Amino acid sequence: MRILIQRVKRASVTIENFLKSEIKTGLLVFVGIEDADDEKDSSWLASKLVKMRIFNDEKGVMNLPVTEVDGEIMIVSQFTLHAQTQKGNRPSYIKAARPEKAIPLYEHFCNEVEQLLRKPVKTGEFGADMQVELINDGPVTIWIDSKSSD
């Protein structure tokens, strides 16, 4: 399971010209799920995400987690995080989990984050054609793969 975290000043998801979700200061998190992933991967990443110290403290040092800046979190599914690009110029998504496996893990991840954050998370819509807008703060962009948790 992979997440791509972006520290944002604001972010939104629009689907078919309808505003689905928006946040102000916080984290926009893209989530990719592969066949080998399970709830252990989801729980590890949720904990890592909420505890990640990437907001500035009073000295301007990235030392605070999202919970200490009253930030919000938006989670968007993105199977392309598991693109295989070694051969040719057309990415392969063979490692990305099918919806019957990915949706429950995506929902589990969202629920875990919500419990750890102690407030609702905003989301996109799994499998939808989404337009994601964001103002990246910093910019700060961090990629984490649960397979590197060992």
Image (cartoon, helix red, strand yellow):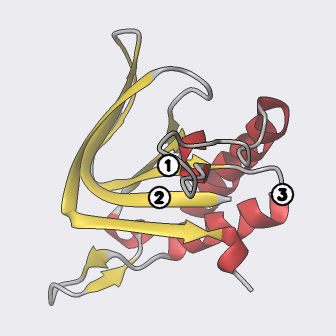
Q: Nearer the viewer, mark 2 or mark 3?
A: 3
Q: Which mark is residue 85?
A: none
User: Dot 2 surroundings within 10 Å: few (below 14), some, or many (20 or more)?
Assistant: many
Q: Quadrant of residue 58?
A: bottom left
User: Dot 1 surroundings within 10 Å: few (below 14), some, or many (20 or more)?
Assistant: many
Q: CA distance from mark 2 to mark 3?
A: 18 Å
Measuring from the top left, give residue 75's x and y in whole percent.
Answer: 51, 45
| Point 43% across, 60% down: residue | 5
Callout 1: SS: strand
Name which of mark 1 and mark 2 comes first in the sequence: 2
Q: Amino acid at mark 1?
A: Phe
Measuring from the top left, give residue 48's x and y in whole percent.
Answer: 58, 73
- With 76 as the anchor, is 92 left or right in this view? right
Measuring from the top left, give residue 136's x and y in whole percent.
Answer: 23, 54
Q: Amino acid at mark 3?
A: Ala
| Point 77% across, 46% down: residue | 105
